[in-house]
Image (cartoon, rainbow, N blue to C red):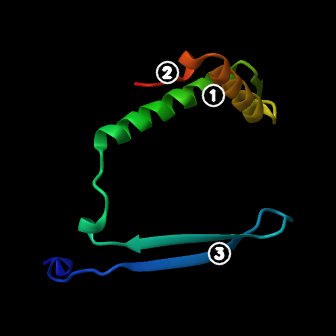
Amino acid sequence: MNHFAKHSIKSERCVSQMQLTAGDSAPISAKIGISVEDAAALPSLDVAAERKIERLAMKVGENLFNFMQSFCGVDGSKLVVPMDILDRWFNKFQERAKRDPGFLKSFAL
């Protein structure tokens, strides 16, 4: 029997704070929160829009992968790329979008 079906749930929040460390670096604070809301209070989901955004993200990711692939080397079983590869890709992506208005439209679905 589902006990939650009998009771209305009011908005409740749970926040957890933690500190993360990497090696000898200073700790980083992070907060993770979960909110339980009444389903009727949440905005409706537009599944078609969500899928369109997902496909757009996949195309942008594919563009990044193809760019990185042209600069990678192999070290044993690892692919190695220059440390500044993301900056170089993003700058090129932005410049092309400014130069060619149709470039971003090619990512639209």
Q: Residue at x 71, y 28 (%)?
A: 89
The residue that disc 1 covers is 64
Q: Is residue 52 above or below residue 26?
A: above
Tell me the distance, in whole angstroms, between the alpha carbons under discs 3 and 1: 32 Å
Q: Is residue 47 above or below residue 82?
A: below
Q: Secondary structure at mark 2?
A: helix
Toward the viewer: 97 or 58? 97
Quadrant of the snapshot with the N terminus: bottom left
Toward the viewer: 32 or 50? 50
Asked if residue 40 can be seen in this view, the reply is yes
Q: Residue at x 60, y 71 (%)?
A: 31
Tell me the distance, in whole angstroms, between the alpha carbons under discs 2 and 3: 41 Å
Counting from the top left corner in percent of width and height, residue 37 is at 33, 72
The residue that disc 2 covers is 105
Which badge, 2 or 3, comes first in the chain's sequence?
3
Dot 2, crowdedness within 10 Å: few (<14), some or many (≥20)? few
Counting from the top left corner in percent of width and height, residue 102 is at 54, 16
Residue 91 picture quarter: top right
Going by the image, does 5 lie left or right of 39?
Answer: left
Which badge, 3 or 1, comes first in the chain's sequence?
3
Dot 3, crowdedness within 10 Å: few (<14), some or many (≥20)? few
Residue 63 picture quarter: top right
Instruction: State which mark lies toward you, 1 or 2.
Output: 2
Q: Residue at x 43, y 37 (%)?
A: 54
The numbered mark at residue 18 is 3
